[in-house]
Image (spheres, rainbow, N blue to C red):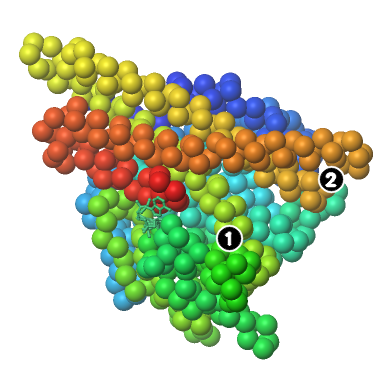
Amino acid sequence: MTLISDDFLADNPDLRFYVNHWIDWAILAEEVEYKGFSEELANAGDGYTNTMEARDVYADVLSLAGQLAAGEIAPRAAQIDREGLELVDGEVVLPDAMTEIFHTLAETGLHGMCVPREFGGMNVPLMVYFLSGELFARADVSVMAHFGFHGGIAMALLVYSALEGTATVDPETGGIVDCRFADAVRDIVENAEWGSMDITEPGAGSDVGAMRTRGVQNADGQWFVTGQKIFITSGNGKYHIVLARTEDAGESDDPMAGLGGLSLFLVEAWSEDASGDRVRHATLSRIEEKLGHHASPTVAVDFDNAPAELIGKRGEGFKLMLLLMNNARISVGFEGLGVCEAALRMARAYAAERVSMGKTINKHELIADYIDEMENTVVGLRAICVDAGFSEELAQRKRLRLMYAPPEDAAEKRALEREVKDLAWQSRLNTPLLKYMAAEAAVDMARQTLQIHGGYGYTTEYGAEKLLRDALVLPIYEGTSQI
Ligand SMILES: Cc1cc2nc3c(=O)[nH]c(=O)nc-3n(C[C@H](O)[C@H](O)[C@H](O)COP(=O)(O)OP(=O)(O)OC[C@H]3O[C@@H](n4cnc5c(N)ncnc54)[C@H](O)[C@@H]3O)c2cc1C
């Protein structure tokens, strides 16, 4: 079986084509490295001499991700799948194999890969994170999902602070040097703390407007959140971005009815008392037993008057949450792509070895067609994924530049406004399409791979059934395929 690889980037020529040729890293580096480029910055470890140097570092980070995926995650995936996670005394307990993986990921600093250096991160483009998503998901999609709730939440908090105007921006460089959630961001990056996105409730999944969790403000202006959220990925983490109802609608056509009455909060699930013991403000009442996705904790979280910080303005919650979900949907696209890549390789390797009626099954026309089709799907999906990720990142970064460091020249400013609008449109069209196509393709290809393995596919021997079990969640979370 030729599935063993020690580097998931090096063994993938199509992915390397995007990394080495297609992606215009210079354009991204110009946006990300807001201080510009100089030898002085490079010597101080605070930037690069030029965009070529930045590009080399991005390639190195991806190479590291490829090696960790192949060397650390993939070899432990079957064990994690078997052992799963437990809820003991209200806390999630990870199996040793998973602790080892996340310990290694933390040591490499990859948690904060996109977070600015001012907050302890590596300050690489989001595109590096998206591509790492494919690499990690090829090894185990649930490890990738859990990993995403480190840096993803840190970046969301930075962007929220910037959008609400509470970030401190260096007027010379346009870079965020401080923000309202700086402690949380640093905790995630430096201490490998987790965050989560808490939207779903027992009676409100796709129908977000039906949610019942309440945000209430007391006379001193302090907010508190009460209610239950379910199916929360990485809900064992400390930093919960929670959507809750703050406005009561008078009539059904009141703009505060439904989605307009929702606000977004940051809730810290616990604090520490004087003796350093954990005092929980949000409790974990259940961990879901799932078909697959076993490295990713999916929990029910109960908030009972939990102290909360309002993010943005009252009634802006749904709009702000969509911003976070947009990135998350692109990430799910890359997760789906990683599953497809794994399925293709598993199918190809097995079909090249399994003999039936005098020849290997890849010489039987129907199986050869399946594999051809899978190869085309993977290549096509990767093109859409990279394009969507690229336009979304540029739209977000240029929008912030427009807010905090707009060009002085009026014509240049108008051109930037137009560019942001075009990029945002492109991303708005691509993102749901990408999420839908990648999620459905992952399920189809995992099933096809199981079928190509015949009876062995239905057993646990080759891992084809695990791939299918893991893939089946992709058309459900971050907005179902039907929605
Ligand atoms: C492993 C896992 C991890 C998750 N992680 C998170 C998380 O981190 N945070 C979070 O908030 N949530 C999370 N979720 C919840 C997930 O986002 C919801 O399950 C999803 O939004 C669907 O909601 P529901 O389960 O209530 O299904 P429902 O909304 O009840 O839908 C049931 C079915 O009806 C269909 N349907 C519903 N409305 C329509 C419509 N208008 N038109 C056509 N079809 C429709 C749906 O597509 C689906 O097939 C997770 C779920 C899982 C399984």
Q: Position of residue 2 (x, y in %)?
A: 26, 24
Q: Is residue 329 visible?
A: yes
Name the side, left or right, on which 116 lies relative to 347.
right
Q: Quadrant of residue 23?
A: top right
Q: Quick one: quadrant of the N terminus?
A: top left
Residue placed under numbered mark 1 in the picture? 318
Identify the disc placed on residue 406: 2
Q: Quadrant of residue 429?
A: top right
Q: Position of residue 5 (x, y in %)?
A: 34, 29
Identify which amino acid the numbered label 1 is placed on. Answer: Phe
Identify the residue at image location x=36%, y=22%: 375
Look at the picture and state if 119 lies above or below 41.
below
C-beta proximity under 8 Å, tags 1 and 2: no
Mark 1 vs mark 2, foreground winner is: 1
Q: Residues within 10 Å of mark 2 (few under 14, many from 20)?
A: some
Q: Residues within 10 Å of mark 1 (few under 14, many from 20)?
A: many
